[in-house]
Amino acid sequence: MNPLRLLLLGAPGSGKGTQTSKLLNQFKHIKSVSSGDLLRRRIQQKTELGRIASEYISQGKLLPDSLMNDLVVGELSVRGWLSADSSFLLDGFPRTLEQARSLRVQLTPHNASLNLVVELDVPTDVILERIENRYVHVPSGRVYNLTYNPPKVPGKDDVTGEPLIKRPDDTSEVFGKRLKNYAETVEPLKQFYSELGILKTVSGPTSDIIFPQLLKLVVQKLHQP
Ligand code: ATP
Ligand code: MG
Protein backbone atom coordinates (compact mmCIF):
# COMPACT_ATOMS: atom_id res chain seq x y z
CA MET A 1 0.00 0.00 0.00
CA ASN A 2 1.24 3.51 -0.83
CA PRO A 3 1.47 6.21 1.80
CA LEU A 4 -1.36 8.74 1.67
CA ARG A 5 -0.53 12.37 2.33
CA LEU A 6 -3.80 14.14 1.75
CA LEU A 7 -4.85 17.76 1.98
CA LEU A 8 -8.57 18.51 2.22
CA LEU A 9 -9.46 21.87 0.73
CA GLY A 10 -12.87 23.42 1.12
CA ALA A 11 -14.75 26.48 2.27
CA PRO A 12 -15.40 26.87 5.99
CA GLY A 13 -18.26 24.56 6.86
CA SER A 14 -17.77 22.41 3.76
CA GLY A 15 -17.26 19.38 5.99
CA LYS A 16 -13.48 18.94 6.17
CA GLY A 17 -13.71 17.88 9.81
CA THR A 18 -16.59 15.47 9.16
CA GLN A 19 -14.89 13.85 6.16
CA THR A 20 -11.70 13.57 8.19
CA SER A 21 -13.49 11.63 10.96
CA LYS A 22 -15.07 9.33 8.41
CA LEU A 23 -11.71 8.59 6.78
CA LEU A 24 -9.94 8.02 10.10
CA ASN A 25 -12.69 5.54 11.08
CA GLN A 26 -12.04 3.60 7.93
CA PHE A 27 -8.22 3.72 7.83
CA LYS A 28 -6.75 3.19 11.25
CA HIS A 29 -3.17 3.82 10.05
CA ILE A 30 -3.96 7.36 8.90
CA LYS A 31 -3.79 10.29 11.32
CA SER A 32 -4.80 13.90 10.87
CA VAL A 33 -3.83 17.43 11.79
CA SER A 34 -6.29 20.31 11.63
CA SER A 35 -4.73 23.77 11.83
CA GLY A 36 -7.93 25.25 13.27
CA ASP A 37 -8.06 22.56 15.97
CA LEU A 38 -4.40 23.18 16.85
CA LEU A 39 -5.16 26.88 17.28
CA ARG A 40 -8.35 26.32 19.28
CA ARG A 41 -6.44 24.04 21.66
CA ARG A 42 -3.78 26.75 22.15
CA ILE A 43 -6.58 29.21 22.91
CA GLN A 44 -8.14 26.88 25.46
CA GLN A 45 -4.72 26.30 27.07
CA LYS A 46 -4.23 30.09 27.18
CA THR A 47 -0.75 30.01 25.62
CA GLU A 48 0.85 33.07 24.03
CA LEU A 49 0.12 31.69 20.57
CA GLY A 50 -3.47 31.10 21.70
CA ARG A 51 -3.80 34.74 22.66
CA ILE A 52 -2.56 35.88 19.25
CA ALA A 53 -4.69 33.30 17.45
CA SER A 54 -7.90 34.34 19.17
CA GLU A 55 -7.43 37.92 17.96
CA TYR A 56 -7.19 36.83 14.35
CA ILE A 57 -9.83 34.12 14.56
CA SER A 58 -12.42 36.32 16.24
CA GLN A 59 -12.12 38.75 13.31
CA GLY A 60 -12.21 36.03 10.67
CA LYS A 61 -8.65 36.89 9.58
CA LEU A 62 -5.96 34.45 8.53
CA LEU A 63 -2.92 34.16 10.80
CA PRO A 64 0.50 35.05 9.33
CA ASP A 65 1.88 32.37 7.01
CA SER A 66 5.20 31.93 8.82
CA LEU A 67 3.49 31.35 12.13
CA MET A 68 1.15 28.74 10.65
CA ASN A 69 4.03 27.00 8.91
CA ASP A 70 6.04 26.71 12.10
CA LEU A 71 2.99 25.47 13.99
CA VAL A 72 1.93 22.76 11.56
CA VAL A 73 5.36 21.59 10.41
CA GLY A 74 6.41 21.56 14.08
CA GLU A 75 3.43 19.32 14.84
CA LEU A 76 4.26 16.97 11.93
CA SER A 77 7.82 16.76 13.16
CA VAL A 78 6.90 16.13 16.82
CA ARG A 79 4.57 13.36 15.74
CA GLY A 80 7.35 11.78 13.66
CA TRP A 81 5.49 12.12 10.38
CA LEU A 82 8.29 13.72 8.35
CA SER A 83 9.22 10.47 6.65
CA ALA A 84 8.69 8.81 3.29
CA ASP A 85 6.42 6.05 4.63
CA SER A 86 4.15 8.26 6.73
CA SER A 87 0.46 8.74 5.94
CA PHE A 88 -1.40 11.79 7.15
CA LEU A 89 -4.29 14.06 6.42
CA LEU A 90 -4.15 17.85 6.65
CA ASP A 91 -7.24 19.98 7.25
CA GLY A 92 -7.00 23.77 7.06
CA PHE A 93 -3.32 24.04 6.20
CA PRO A 94 -1.93 25.01 3.72
CA ARG A 95 -4.58 27.55 2.77
CA THR A 96 -2.54 30.20 1.01
CA LEU A 97 -0.15 29.83 -1.91
CA GLU A 98 2.70 30.96 0.32
CA GLN A 99 1.90 28.25 2.87
CA ALA A 100 1.69 25.62 0.11
CA ARG A 101 5.09 26.64 -1.24
CA SER A 102 6.84 26.56 2.08
CA LEU A 103 5.23 23.29 3.10
CA ARG A 104 6.48 21.76 -0.12
CA VAL A 105 10.00 23.03 0.51
CA GLN A 106 9.93 21.51 3.98
CA LEU A 107 8.43 18.13 3.02
CA THR A 108 10.50 17.45 -0.10
CA PRO A 109 13.82 16.69 1.67
CA HIS A 110 12.01 14.04 3.74
CA ASN A 111 10.37 12.49 0.64
CA ALA A 112 7.11 13.25 2.39
CA SER A 113 5.39 15.53 -0.13
CA LEU A 114 1.60 15.60 -0.33
CA ASN A 115 0.33 13.14 -2.92
CA LEU A 116 -3.39 13.99 -3.02
CA VAL A 117 -5.35 17.22 -2.64
CA VAL A 118 -9.15 17.00 -2.64
CA GLU A 119 -11.38 20.01 -2.81
CA LEU A 120 -14.80 19.63 -1.19
CA ASP A 121 -17.23 21.60 -3.31
CA VAL A 122 -20.44 22.26 -1.37
CA PRO A 123 -23.16 24.81 -2.29
CA THR A 124 -22.96 27.99 -0.21
CA ASP A 125 -26.61 27.89 0.90
CA VAL A 126 -26.03 24.44 2.39
CA ILE A 127 -22.94 25.70 4.19
CA LEU A 128 -24.73 28.68 5.72
CA GLU A 129 -27.50 26.48 7.04
CA ARG A 130 -25.03 24.04 8.59
CA ILE A 131 -23.06 26.64 10.46
CA GLU A 132 -26.03 27.83 12.48
CA ASN A 133 -26.40 24.39 14.03
CA ARG A 134 -22.74 23.53 14.46
CA TYR A 135 -21.16 22.63 17.82
CA VAL A 136 -17.62 21.41 18.49
CA HIS A 137 -15.66 19.53 21.14
CA VAL A 138 -12.47 21.56 21.34
CA PRO A 139 -9.96 19.02 22.75
CA SER A 140 -10.68 16.48 19.98
CA GLY A 141 -12.02 18.69 17.19
CA ARG A 142 -15.15 16.50 16.90
CA VAL A 143 -17.93 18.34 15.11
CA TYR A 144 -21.69 17.95 15.67
CA ASN A 145 -24.70 19.34 13.91
CA LEU A 146 -28.01 19.61 15.73
CA THR A 147 -29.90 18.62 12.58
CA TYR A 148 -27.76 16.01 10.82
CA ASN A 149 -25.44 14.67 13.46
CA PRO A 150 -26.61 15.55 16.99
CA PRO A 151 -24.67 14.43 20.09
CA LYS A 152 -26.22 11.49 21.96
CA VAL A 153 -26.61 13.69 25.05
CA PRO A 154 -27.47 17.32 24.24
CA GLY A 155 -24.50 19.65 24.73
CA LYS A 156 -22.02 16.82 25.49
CA ASP A 157 -19.30 15.10 23.46
CA ASP A 158 -20.21 11.46 22.67
CA VAL A 159 -16.81 10.09 23.61
CA THR A 160 -15.73 12.09 26.67
CA GLY A 161 -19.01 13.60 27.93
CA GLU A 162 -17.25 16.98 28.01
CA PRO A 163 -19.14 20.14 27.02
CA LEU A 164 -19.57 21.21 23.40
CA ILE A 165 -19.19 24.84 22.41
CA LYS A 166 -20.42 27.03 19.60
CA ARG A 167 -17.36 28.50 17.84
CA PRO A 168 -17.21 32.24 18.44
CA ASP A 169 -16.23 32.68 14.77
CA ASP A 170 -19.40 30.92 13.56
CA THR A 171 -21.47 34.13 13.83
CA SER A 172 -22.91 35.32 10.53
CA GLU A 173 -20.66 38.40 10.43
CA VAL A 174 -17.36 36.58 11.02
CA PHE A 175 -18.44 33.60 8.99
CA GLY A 176 -19.09 35.85 6.01
CA LYS A 177 -15.52 37.12 6.23
CA ARG A 178 -14.16 33.59 6.41
CA LEU A 179 -16.08 32.60 3.28
CA LYS A 180 -14.76 35.65 1.48
CA ASN A 181 -11.17 34.88 2.55
CA TYR A 182 -11.55 31.38 1.26
CA ALA A 183 -12.83 32.52 -2.11
CA GLU A 184 -9.90 34.93 -2.41
CA THR A 185 -7.15 32.49 -1.49
CA VAL A 186 -8.24 29.17 -2.91
CA GLU A 187 -7.71 29.74 -6.64
CA PRO A 188 -3.90 30.13 -6.58
CA LEU A 189 -3.72 27.20 -4.18
CA LYS A 190 -5.73 25.01 -6.55
CA GLN A 191 -3.56 26.15 -9.45
CA PHE A 192 -0.42 25.15 -7.51
CA TYR A 193 -1.67 21.63 -6.79
CA SER A 194 -3.23 21.22 -10.19
CA GLU A 195 0.17 21.91 -11.78
CA LEU A 196 1.62 19.18 -9.56
CA GLY A 197 -1.08 16.87 -10.94
CA ILE A 198 -2.57 15.94 -7.56
CA LEU A 199 -5.74 18.07 -7.36
CA LYS A 200 -9.19 16.42 -7.43
CA THR A 201 -12.64 17.86 -6.72
CA VAL A 202 -15.67 16.16 -5.18
CA SER A 203 -19.07 17.85 -5.14
CA GLY A 204 -22.37 17.48 -3.38
CA PRO A 205 -24.76 18.90 -0.82
CA THR A 206 -24.29 16.32 1.98
CA SER A 207 -21.45 14.49 3.68
CA ASP A 208 -23.04 11.19 2.66
CA ILE A 209 -22.85 12.14 -1.00
CA ILE A 210 -19.32 13.52 -0.72
CA PHE A 211 -17.78 10.67 1.27
CA PRO A 212 -18.02 7.82 -1.28
CA GLN A 213 -16.35 10.04 -3.89
CA LEU A 214 -13.56 10.93 -1.49
CA LEU A 215 -13.15 7.31 -0.43
CA LYS A 216 -12.73 6.25 -4.05
CA LEU A 217 -9.92 8.77 -4.59
CA VAL A 218 -8.20 7.67 -1.39
CA VAL A 219 -8.41 3.97 -2.23
CA GLN A 220 -7.04 4.68 -5.72
CA LYS A 221 -4.09 6.53 -4.23
CA LEU A 222 -3.39 3.83 -1.66
CA HIS A 223 -3.38 1.07 -4.27
CA GLN A 224 -2.09 2.82 -7.37
CA PRO A 225 0.88 0.91 -8.78
P1 ATP B 1 -14.29 24.95 9.10
O1 ATP B 1 -13.59 24.44 10.30
O2 ATP B 1 -15.66 25.38 9.32
O3 ATP B 1 -14.18 24.04 7.93
P2 ATP B 1 -12.35 26.95 8.56
O4 ATP B 1 -11.59 26.10 7.63
O5 ATP B 1 -12.50 28.39 8.23
O6 ATP B 1 -13.75 26.35 8.71
P3 ATP B 1 -10.57 26.43 10.71
O7 ATP B 1 -9.73 25.69 9.76
O8 ATP B 1 -10.98 25.80 11.97
O9 ATP B 1 -11.89 26.91 10.04
O10 ATP B 1 -9.84 27.82 11.01
C1 ATP B 1 -10.38 28.74 11.91
C2 ATP B 1 -9.55 30.00 11.88
O11 ATP B 1 -8.20 29.71 12.26
C3 ATP B 1 -9.43 30.66 10.52
O12 ATP B 1 -10.51 31.52 10.27
C4 ATP B 1 -8.11 31.43 10.68
O13 ATP B 1 -8.30 32.59 11.45
C5 ATP B 1 -7.27 30.47 11.49
N1 ATP B 1 -6.50 29.54 10.63
C6 ATP B 1 -6.66 28.19 10.56
N2 ATP B 1 -5.81 27.64 9.68
C7 ATP B 1 -5.10 28.68 9.15
C8 ATP B 1 -4.09 28.78 8.15
N3 ATP B 1 -3.62 27.70 7.51
N4 ATP B 1 -3.61 30.00 7.87
C9 ATP B 1 -4.05 31.10 8.49
N5 ATP B 1 -5.01 31.08 9.43
C10 ATP B 1 -5.54 29.89 9.76
MG1 MG C 1 -12.55 22.69 10.36
Image (cartoon, rainbow, N blue to C red):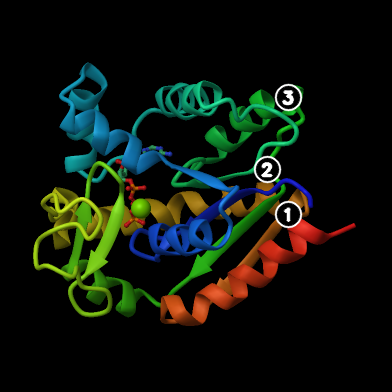
- In the image, residue 79 sits, relative to residue 14, either above or below, namely above
Q: What is the C-alpha distance between the residues marked 3 and 1? A: 19 Å
Which badge, 3 or 1, comes first in the chain's sequence? 3
The label nearer to you, 3 versus 1, is: 3
Element carrying mark 3:
helix
- In the image, residue 206 sits, relative to residue 215, either above or below, namely below
Residue at mark 1: 198
Q: What is the C-alpha distance between the residues marked 2 and 3? A: 11 Å
Q: Nearer the viewer, residue 23 or 46?
A: 23
Element carrying mark 2:
loop
Is 127 positioned to the left or the right of 157 in the image? Answer: right
Tell me the amino acid under the disc marked 3: His
Element carrying mark 1:
loop
Residue 63: % across, % down: 34, 32
Hey, which quadrant is residue 155 in on the image? Answer: bottom left
Q: Are marks 1 and 2 in contact (CB under 8 Å)?
A: yes
Residue at mark 2: 114
Which quadrant is home to the C terminus? bottom right
Tell me the amino acid under the disc marked 1: Ile
User: Which numbered circle lies on residue 60?
Assistant: none
- The 10 Å Cα crowd at callout 3, few under 14, some 14 to 19, many 20 or more, is few
Residue depicted at 34% across the width and 57% down the height: 180
Residue at mark 3: 110
